[in-house]
Amino acid sequence: LFVCYIGIKIILSAANISISTAPVEHIIIPNFKDGFLLQWLNPKAWLACVSGITMFTSIENPQSLPIFIIIYFFTCYACLFFWGFCGDKFSVVLNQGNRLKYFNILMGAFLILSALLILIDFF
């Protein structure tokens, strides 16, 4: 129900992207190192990592843990790069006309639909 509530909030959210016009010397722009280190504080990433370790490694096969760690590390950072790149490009595309409004409606509807499908499957 909470996920449906978030989907409704996304659908009804204000569709605007605001870009600050403050002088550059007052804006702190995070660099690559900051983003890289920030991922180590991400609780969702830790939960996914612990879940992956329990599913894809075993005591009987000790070399599976370093293999999992290497694959997980590079996969996560490749996805983060792709997410950042797409976010940068989509902000330009969605800042024209009503595109952001329609995008919010579509994403909120997908979120509600996925939550309802999980509920239907559960019961």
Image (cartoon, rainbow, N blue to C red):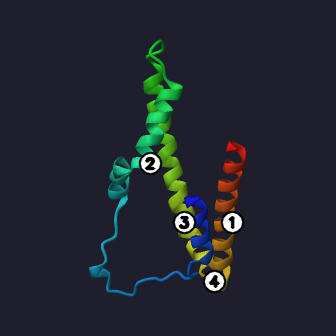
Viewer can see residue 73:
no
Q: Quadrant of residue 101?
A: bottom right
Image location (x, y in percent) of residue 69: 44, 32
Going from N to C along the chain, the mark reached first, 3 or 2, is 2
Q: Crowdedness of circle 3 by 10 Å Cα count: few (<14), some, many (20+)?
A: few
Task: Name the amino acid type tagged 4.
Answer: Gln
Going from N to C along the chain, the mark reached first, 4 or 3, is 3
- As drawn, the residue found furthest toward the left would be 25
Residue wearing tag 3: 87
Residue depth check, mark 3 versus mark 2: number of the one nearer the observer: 2
Residue wearing tag 1: 109
Image location (x, y in percent) of residue 70: 45, 33
Task: Name the amino acid type tagged 3.
Answer: Gly
* Separation of marks 1 and 4 at Cα, in angstroms: 21 Å
* Separation of marks 1 and 3 at Cα, in angstroms: 20 Å
For the residue labelled by badge 1, is the local secondary structure a helix, a strand or a loop?
helix
* Separation of marks 4 and 3 at Cα, in angstroms: 15 Å
Disc assigned to residue 96? 4
Residue wearing tag 2: 44
Task: Name the amino acid type tagged 1.
Answer: Ala
Q: Quadrant of residue 23?
A: bottom left
Name the quarter where the N terminus is drawn. Answer: bottom right
104 lies left or right of 23: right
Going from N to C along the chain, the mark reached first, 2 or 1, is 2
Q: Crowdedness of circle 1 by 10 Å Cα count: few (<14), some, many (20+)?
A: some
For the residue labelled by badge 2, is the local secondary structure a helix, a strand or a loop?
helix
* Separation of marks 2 and 1 at Cα, in angstroms: 23 Å
Q: Crowdedness of circle 2 by 10 Å Cα count: few (<14), some, many (20+)?
A: few
Going from N to C along the chain, the mark reached first, 1 or 4, is 4
Image location (x, y in percent) of residue 95: 59, 81
Which residue is at 41% across, 42% downward?
A: 46
* Separation of marks 3 and 2 at Cα, in angstroms: 20 Å
